[in-house]
Image (tube, rainbow, N blue to C red):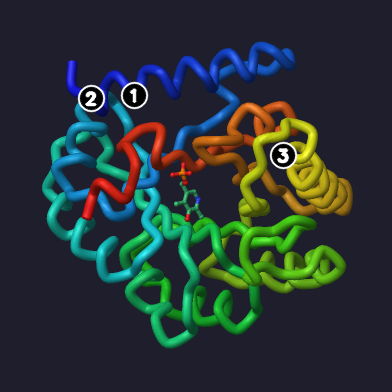
Amino acid sequence: MTRIAANLQAVRARIDAAARAVGRAPESVTLLAVSKTWPATCVLDAAACGQRAFGENYLQEGLDKIAALAATESPGGLEWHFIGPLQSNKTRPVAENFAWVHSVDRLKIAERLSAQRPAGLPPLSVCLQVNVSGEASKSGVAPDDVSELARQIAALPQLRLRGLMAIPAPSDDPATQRAPFRELRQLFERLRADGLPLDTLSMGMSHDLEAAIAEGATLVRIGTAIFGDRSASV
Ligand SMILES: *Cc1c(COP(=O)(O)O)cnc(C)c1O
């Protein structure tokens, strides 16, 4: 078994255990493999184990990998998610090459993605990135502005608003990990109660996936625990 195959199996076991611990079905949590900084051969290793969804942060690197793997034989092909910061002058290749964007945090970006999404493709799935308390970066819409922005984005024709995403600052303390995830879930439930048909809570990384799943994550974004320490990749 390759190192990546063994790591993937261990991550799936963590996801299953975390879901069962709170009475959730393990299949209710999608695993997004974050392949940033790792070469296409590593993506192929993971794809050979049945992993289908991959996340990239850096546009050019992601585009290169998508092109290199376009002919891969994975059933149904690979599904690419853009999860990094997005500048408005770089939206076109994202709209043309990715299936999902998790990092939408302003209307201008969403409008461009919608306008640039090719008509022959299904609508681009998007999550709103929210700056919850303890956020690791300055990106993300403020919690008070989520509702209005979500409504505006949900009205764009070539986008499908799927849910919310956050990247809280790392912590070793489970209670500290859970607080921002809970805040995101409460925002998510409020939007759903208001009638938006959202299905995705994108939260949880290698070090805090258990806390995220306990708070309702439907998609965890895992890099290090699958591919290894990124400082070793470059
Ligand atoms: C790098 C990254 C991840 C994966 O983080 P790990 O700690 O390596 O699992 C997840 N989400 C985003 C937005 C990232 O930039």
Contact flag, marks 1 and 2 (Cβ < 8 Å): yes
Residue 9 sits above or below residue 105 on the image? above
Image coords of residue 3 (percent x, y):
23, 24
Q: Residues within 10 Å of mark 2 (few under 14, many from 20)?
A: some
| Residue closest to the eye, 149 or 85 | 85
- The amino acid type, in three-letter code, at marker 1 is Asn
Which badge, 3 or 1, is on the more N-terminal residue?
1
- Residue at 34%, 42% (x, y): give it: 229
Above or below residue 145? Residue 177 is above
Q: CA distance from mark 1 to mark 2?
A: 6 Å
In the picture, measured across the screen, residue 194 lies left or right of residue 56, that is right
Residue position for label 3: 177
Instruction: Name the quadrant containing residue 27.
Output: top right
User: Can residue 26 be seen here?
Assistant: yes
Residue at mark 1: C-beta within 8 A of ligand 1? no
For image coordinates 38% across by 69% down, the residue present is: 94
Residue that badge 2 annotates? 3
